[in-house]
Amino acid sequence: MAPRKEVFEGVEWRIRVAADGSLEALVPATGLARKAWLGIKGLISGFALKVTMFVKKAWDVETNDPRKVIHCIKVGLALAIVSLFYFMRPLYDGVGGNAMWTVMTVVVVFEPTVGATLYKCFNRVLGTFLAGFLALGVHWVASQSGERVEPFVVGASVFLLASAATFSRLIPSVKSRFDYGALIFILTFSFVAVSGYRVDKLFELAHHRISTIIIGSSLCILVIMLVCPIWSGQELHSLIVRNMDKLADSLDGCVTQYFNQSGEGTNSKEEATDNKLQGYKCVLSSKASEESMANFGRWEPSHGQFNFRHPWKQYLKIGASMRSCAYCMEALNSCIKSENQAAKLIKQHLGSGCLKVSSSSSNVIRELAETVKTMKKKSSTTELLAEEMKSAVQGLQNDLKTIPHLLNPSAIPGNKTLETACLEATTPTVTLMELVPVVTLASILIEISGRIEALVDAVEELAKLAEFGINDDKSKHSKMTDKTVSDAKQQTEGTMKALQRV
């Protein structure tokens, strides 16, 4: 009987057997077509995964800040309107083939905020107009000089004016307001002046270029101001308020974490505290944003609570004062994370005073944030909290002065009593390395309170220049202030109880 042969369709498996009979490997035998299919399948799966991740990130961006999507829609709307210069024959004949400059103007000058768009539109129109006017004058002078001298006149004018405009961009006062205009001036003057040597209808070229840029800029201004406008001044105002709140939370979080290390906190509380500790870093990194927003805010018209001549420069001074406090917060955070552990005796002795200073200082910062946010004067409440901060600082300074007597009870003036002798016997020995961390922390807190006084002066100056209104709802505000102070006292008492258990 012939041996029975069975044919199996599918993958054939090859098994390698070593000399001792053990199994070495189990490898499927695949053909070239199957390998190619698996490779293509892997590429498709990877591409689909990347697309899915991209869509998810785009959705997160839209959810976190819908204004970005609105800005994209406004850009598309402006470009759709300006494209009519190509689709409609009368408009196209009015500007000729230079209608492309209108599209380029919309693409280049359209920015997310009103101030930034106005800044670019004004600079682009002004730079184009001045450059076109001077280019026509240079062309007339060159044409009257003869064919041989004309190239040298044009070249010399381009060299001199381009060099002067470039130098003006290096001047800080010019760079902050007209840097983009100087750039457009160089581009337009060089283009028109050099083109005039070969183009006969130079005046028509300059006229069409200026007209198309004015049309594109005007369209951008209308769209950016009428369709969900985003104001640079309002963004700066909100940024300053947020940074004040973050600075106050960081100050509370740092000191509370240092004196409340009993290990009773949950993971969620620890994560919340860590987030508060990082808040001051946003203040340190916001200088560039504040300067650009203040520069663009000066170009914006009156809107909401902000007048055309609103003192935006004062916001920069407030930001500088906050960064001065944030630098101390950086040193305070480094002190808290130091490997040198403070003595429990000194920690308990200075804990109450440090917590009171941090609590009163953060209350002052929060009150200033509320003043800026509502644009209402609350001088009485601010002065009360500032006096409370000064009183807490004075108490902490007195605690620092009593440290030598705490470590050496025999140094107390007067006769040596039995109680003093008992204190000498029970007082532990404290090394200098155990004394430095907590004393340094207390000194930094005192320095922060002094810098907060400068922040108070900056906010009061802003209230004076911007003519803040008077807060009429005193009862409601007093209840909010009392609640803030009571919460701070409860937090301080809870931390001190934790210190005593330690």
Image: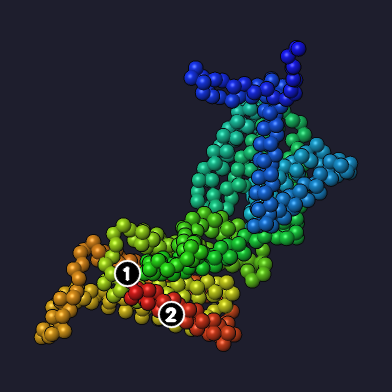
Q: Compute the Cα span from label 2 to label 1.
A: 19 Å
Give the color scheme: rainbow, by chain, secondary structure or one colour.
Answer: rainbow
Residue drawn at x 77%, y 34% is 201
**At numbered mark 1, what does the secondary structure look like: helix, strand or loop?**
helix
- Taking the image as shown, residue 30 lies to the left or right of residue 410, namely right
Return the x and y of residue 91 as percentages of the image width and height: 86, 44
Q: Residues within 10 Å of mark 2 (few under 14, many from 20)?
A: some
Q: Quadrant of the C terminus?
A: bottom left
Residue type at the position of mark 2? Lys
Identify the image quadrant of residue 93: top right
Q: How crowded is mark 1: few (under 14 residues within 10 Å), some or many (20 or more)?
A: many
Residue 453: in sight, yes or no? no
Rendered view: 274 above or below 41: below
Which sits earlier in the primary sequence, circle 2 or circle 1? 1
Task: List the residue tagged with mark 1.
Answer: 442
Return the x and y of residue 474 as percentages of the image width and height: 56, 86
Residue type at the position of mark 1? Ala
Q: How many marks?
A: 2
Q: Quadrant of the N terminus?
A: top right
Identify the image quadrant of residue 421: bottom left
Residue drawn at x 59%, y 67% is 310
Identify the image quadrant of residue 189: top right
Return the x and y of residue 404 as percentages of the image width and height: 19, 73
Residue drawn at x 60%, y 47% is 180
**Which residue occupies the extreme right position in the image?**
89
Closer to us: 360 or 111: 360
Rendered view: 29 above or below 278: above
Residue drawn at x 57%, y 38% is 162
Task: List the residue tagged with mark 2.
Answer: 489
Closer to us: 340 or 356: 340
